[in-house]
Image (spheres, rainbow, N blue to C red):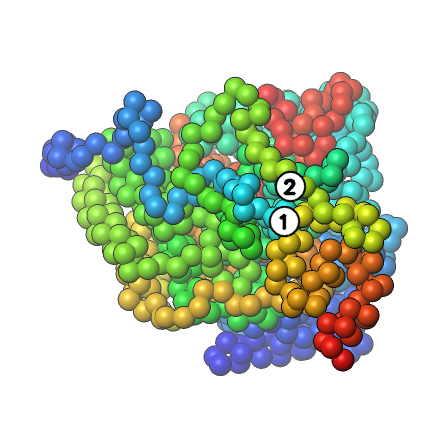
């Protein structure tokens, strides 16, 4: 009897196999696919690179620019970069068809101009990050944002006194 | 509170077993764990007394995991931590012994607890601690061509170090596990036996492992296992360059089937070590996902088992039912597998009302489909008679070899981490643990059948009971050098992670121990006396996970010739 019931059940059951790749495959909302960095929002802070478990995101300074590079060949699609980004510049898309014959297709680079210290002239952070920080400071302290950490330390006492108006 | 008093009993037994001045109860690293440090000279005797002492109280000491750690940068010594599970008293007992460099030696406890055999050999390979008195010493995880005296998990071995040319063995012709005559080849009445190699890829599981099977005609007279072909260097990687919140994603990749259980065990170990209170809602979400993972894993196994029995209809049907589980997992977590839901302190995503409804629909579908199909299939003679009385593991052998999970439960051992050492939200519900006494392949099938239905019931209960609240505790800088043990009941059995926290939210030591590590040594015992044709289903009946077991291993050498050893790079097996 068992055999006949199995046969009947098999005939009644629906097909689970999808026609993909002949027909597109649906992935649900919230699917963790390819991360993309929005070059217009990124401030180059490097939070994503710090959190990334497989070191798929790297940050380096070269020729007056900060280069944030995402290499999908190492990416594990965990989405931690999007979790920790303070500017919501990383978006986890639903793209998953990433196979390519070209290695370049697997990389995304964001280049951001570096700010130079107003005193010593050393590049120390991206211009965008510096402006962002400056906009959050009380007006009197703003010039501090345009100094590298070393010069800022040297001048901080003075600015704090002026800034607080003491 | 019941748990605390159980640990008090454990502490009492430990004190009784210790004579004055030979170490003492160091304390309770966290709830459900007792830690004791003893002199290495007294270790063997201490373990003997422990077994007796717990025996008098009707409790069994089960060897869970062993971890050697290079503490030279901290206090100048090496340390071996044997983690013993006293399931009846809901406690993990960590027994530590120190050994000074340059030649650390700690007497083996394998004669007392045979299940310690692999852990000690692995410690000898990876950390270079010797275990005098071990009944079968020798390399377990490092290949023969690996140079003497180089131990990858020592702190002075950089994680990105590449070794040059490996020296082949002197003479270089005999390769353990790959050639005759085997020193273990049992003859029958003076006649030599034939050797049938099974592997290095399992015909059904597509994972690298190798069984040497000695046959006299159709009958198997002996079998040996050679595994550890899959090196991924995970422990070293985590200890060298990752932070505590990155490791859950690595831990999840120990296994492609039951990875989430590893991520949970790891997080629990760190949370226990640092005494982080995880919000209740997060604990419920973890439990729901753990049971969803068990559903997918067991259904996958049913498919594979039916396939191995030549019952292809069963394979297709089980995987069809399983597909609903995979889709729900994808909707809940963003991926069919590697859920990526855990961070130390909680989970990353909530299960909202709409997603919960999708889970409920899935449960109904799976329960109906599974019951209906198995109801017929498990009455078919060609399925049931094919596995009845086959591959028997006696209760005594299961205890001796430290078997865990459904495999142990099919041999009459009522152990289940969800009940014995409650974690996540399992302390809030009653978990029904099916146990059978036959110990054959059929019993393993029937135990897993019950477990599938119990998982369905548990997920429903968790969904109903899930309280509102936060998803993640705030995690600040963890205190360094704290020890934590995290255990989960993976689909294959007890999964234990041992951690020692490091400075700046890193790990000083991390050792995951997958359930198959304990179950694989039972396979040669089950094979003996069987017909050769039964070997594949017997091996598959423990639901082995070879890559999990091998995670910490180094292999890419062809023996007998000098060639560059691509150390610490993932790689192919020696026969590839």
Q: Are dots 1 and 2 on a single chain?
A: yes
Please state which of residues B563 and B270 is positioned toward the viewer in this rendering.
Answer: B270
Looking at the image, residue B572 sits to the left or right of residue A32; the answer is right
Residue B243, how many percent across, how many down?
Answer: 65, 53
Q: Which residue is mark 2?
A: A112
Q: Quadrant of the C terminus of chain B?
A: top right
The residue shown at (57%, 24%) is A103
Q: Which residue appears at 57% of the width and 46% of the height? A: A42
User: Is residue A125 depicted above or below B310 in this figure?
Assistant: below
Give residue B471's position: percent from left, percent from top: 45, 64
Label 1 sits on residue: A128
Can residue B75 be spotted in the picture?
yes
* Residues at marks 1 and 2 touching, judged by CB atoms closer than 8 Å: yes
Q: Residue at x 53, y 57 (%)?
A: B343
Q: Which of the marked residues, 1 or 2, is nearer the chain's N terminus? A: 2
Q: Residues within 10 Å of mark 2 (few under 14, many from 20)?
A: many
Q: Residue at x 76, y 20 (%)?
A: B563
A165 or B53: which is nearer to us? Answer: A165
x and y percent of residue B202 in the render? 48, 29
Q: CA distance from mark 1 to mark 2?
A: 8 Å
Towards the viewer: B359 or B487: B359
In the image, residue A12 sits, relative to residue B57, either above or below, namely above
Q: Residue furthest right?
A: B102
Mark 1 neighbour class, 10 Å CA radius: few under 14, some 14 to 19, many 20 or more: some
Residue B187 located left or right of residue B507: left
**Residue sitting nearer the eye, B131 or B568:** B568
């Amino acid at each position: 009897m068992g055999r006949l019931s199995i046969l009947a059940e098999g005939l009644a059951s629906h097909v689970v196999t999808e026609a993909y790749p002949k027909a597109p495959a649906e992935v649900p909302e919230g699917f963790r696919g390819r991360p993309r960095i929005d070059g217009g929002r990124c401030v180059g802070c490097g939070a994503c690179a710090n959190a990334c478990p497989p070191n798929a995101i790297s940050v380096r300074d070269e020729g007056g620019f900060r280069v944030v590079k995402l290499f999908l060949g190492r990416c594990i699609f965990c989405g931690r970069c999007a979790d920790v980004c303070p500017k919501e510049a990383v978006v986890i898309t639903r793209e998953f068809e990433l196979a390519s014959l070209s290695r370049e297709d697997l990389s995304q680079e964001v280049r951001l101009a570096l700010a130079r210290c107003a005193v010593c002239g050393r590049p120390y952070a991206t211009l965008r990050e510096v402006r962002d920080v400056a906009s959050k400071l009380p007006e009197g302290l703003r010039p501090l944002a345009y100094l590298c950490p070393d010069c800022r330390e040297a001048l901080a006492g003075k600015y704090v006194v002026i800034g607080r108006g003491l | 509170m019941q748990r605390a008093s159980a640990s008090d009993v454990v502490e009492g037994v430990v004190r009784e077993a210790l004579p004055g001045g030979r170490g003492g109860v160091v304390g309770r690293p966290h709830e459900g764990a007792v830690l004791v440090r003893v002199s290495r000279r007294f270790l063997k005797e201490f373990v003997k007394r422990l077994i007796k002492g717990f025996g008098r109280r009707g409790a069994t000491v089960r060897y869970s995991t062993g971890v050697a750690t290079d503490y030279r940068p901290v206090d100048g010594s090496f340390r071996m931590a044997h983690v013993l599970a006293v399931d009846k008293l809901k406690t993990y007992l960590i027994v530590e012994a120190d050994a000074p460099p340059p030649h650390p030696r700690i007497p083996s406890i394998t004669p007392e607890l045979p299940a310690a055999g692999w852990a000690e050999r692995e410690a000898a390979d990876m950390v270079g601690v010797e275990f005098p008195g071990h009944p079968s010493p020798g390399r377990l995880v490092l290949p023969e061509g690996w140079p003497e005296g180089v131990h990858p998990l020592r702190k002075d071995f950089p994680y990105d170090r590449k070794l040059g040319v490996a020296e082949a063995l002197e003479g270089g012709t005999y390769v353990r596990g790959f050639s005759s005559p085997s020193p273990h080849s049992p003859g029958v009445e003076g006649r030599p036996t034939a050797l049938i190699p099974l592997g290095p890829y399992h015909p059904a599981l597509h994972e690298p492992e190798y069984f040497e099977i000695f046959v006299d005609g159709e009958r198997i007279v002996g079998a040996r296992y050679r595994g550890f072909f899959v090196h991924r260097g995970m422990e070293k990687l985590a200890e060298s360059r990752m932070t505590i919140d990155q490791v859950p994603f690595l831990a999840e990749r120990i296994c492609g089937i039951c990875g989430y259980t590893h991520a949970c065990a790891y997080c629990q170990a760190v949370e226990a070590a640092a005494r982080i209170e995880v919000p209740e809602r997060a604990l419920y979400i973890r439990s729901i996902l753990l049971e969803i993972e068990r559903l997918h894993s067991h259904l996958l196994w049913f498919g594979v088992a039916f396939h191995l029995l030549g019952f292809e209809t069963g394979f297709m049907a089980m995987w069809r039912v399983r597909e609903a589980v995979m889709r729900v997992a994808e909707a809940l977590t963003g991926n069919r597998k590697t859920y990526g839901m855990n961070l130390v302190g909680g989970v990353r995503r909530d299960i909202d009302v709409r997603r919960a409804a999708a889970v409920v629909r899935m449960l109904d579908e799976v329960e109906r489909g599974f019951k209906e199909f198995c109801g017929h299939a498990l009455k078919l003679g060609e399925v049931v008679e094919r596995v009845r009385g086959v591959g028997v593991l006696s209760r005594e052998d299961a205890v001796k070899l430290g078997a865990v999970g459904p495999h142990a439960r099919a041999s009459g051992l009522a152990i289940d981490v969800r009940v014995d050492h409650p974690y996540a939200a399992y302390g809030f519900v009653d978990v029904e643990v099916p146990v059978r006494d036959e110990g054959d392949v059929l019993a393993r099938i029937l135990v897993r059948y019950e477990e599938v239905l119990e998982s369905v019931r548990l997920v429903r209960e968790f969904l109903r009971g899930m309280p509102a609240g936060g998803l993640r505790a705030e995690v600040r800088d963890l205190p360094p050098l704290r020890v934590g043990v995290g255990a989960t009941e993976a689909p294959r059995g007890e999964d234990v992670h041992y951690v020692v926290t490091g400075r700046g939210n890193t790990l000083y030591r991390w050792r995951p121990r997958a359930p198959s590590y304990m179950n694989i040594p039972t396979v040669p015992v089950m094979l003996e006396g069987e017909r050769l044709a039964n070997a594949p289903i017997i091996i598959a009946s423990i639901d082995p996970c070879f890559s999990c077991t091998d995670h910490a291993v180094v292999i890419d050498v062809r023996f007998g010739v000098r060639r560059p050893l691509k150390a610490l790079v993932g790689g192919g097996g020696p026969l590839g």
